[in-house]
Image: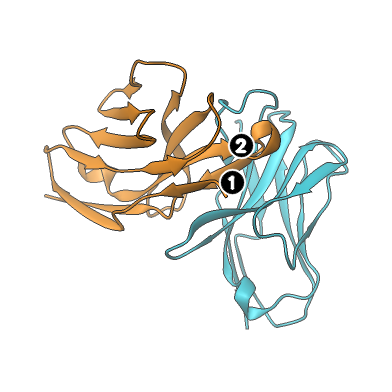
Chain colours: A orange, B cyan
Amino acid sequence: AQTVTQSQPEMSVQEAETVTLSCTYDTSESDYYLFWYKQPPSRQMILVIRQEAYKQQNATENRFSVNFQKAAKSFSLKISDSQLGDAAMYFCAYPSGAGSYQLTFGKGTKLSVIP
Amino acid sequence: EAQVTQNPRYLITVTGKKLTVTCSQNMNHEYMSWYRQDPGLGLRQIYYSMNVEVTDKGDVPEGYKVSRKEKRNFPLILESPSPNQTSLYFCASRTSGAPYNEQFFGPGTRLTVL
């Protein structure tokens, strides 16, 4: 079974500091995509960033960037200059199954931001 | 406004009483999906639909039914709810073809089965 593992159930960061959330996955595919979703207390699921596995360059979206290591099947999310609004659950996910119609999520990391 | 809507947002019911959670999207997306979210387990896919009249099981389909008679609607049916179906449910949609495309999520439905 294809799996996604987030090994840090909870993390905290000081405001304005940098934090990295880890994610590892297991797939036999050679071409695939990876996502990080954010879920604030409002419960809304928000796409933070995505990465195409065949691209060598790590994706970046403003203060959010990824460290994608394909050989190690690792996909970590780095948040720079952390803000109070970054406090949320963060989920790593990737499309799986035949036709990539399924989206497999990790169990999530709860991030707290300390003022 | 492009969005995915779910109704109801909150529901408390009793064991065995059939219920339907509706999901509708206004983005003309072919693909729609249902997830349940439980503490410590993340989101798990229940069912998905690639297009009208085409559905398939996800990872946790037991106890649920779906139908896709119209492109915009994808209701989730619990014919005989049980307490272990108490959960937070999300509907999502995206364009078909490229799995790279973002899935848009509804606001969630908090279901409690007593």
Left or right of B60, for residue A59: left
- Where residue B13 sits in the image (x, y, percent)? 67, 78
CA distance separating discs 2 and 1:
7 Å
Question: Please, is residue A7 above or below residue A67 in the view?
Answer: below
Q: Is residue A113 above or below residue A64?
A: below
Q: Position of residue A59 (x, y in %)?
A: 35, 21
Which quadrant: the C terminus of chain B?
Answer: bottom right
Same subunit: marks 2 and 1: yes
Near-viewer residue (A14 or B21): A14
B60 vs A70, nearest the viewer: A70
Foreground of the two, B41 or B37: B41
SS state under label 1: loop
The chain under label 1 reads B
- Residue A76, percent from left and from top: 31, 37
* Residue B106, label in figure: 1
Query: Which dot marks residue B3?
Result: 2
Residue type pointed to by label 2? Gln
Can residue A108 be seen here? Answer: yes
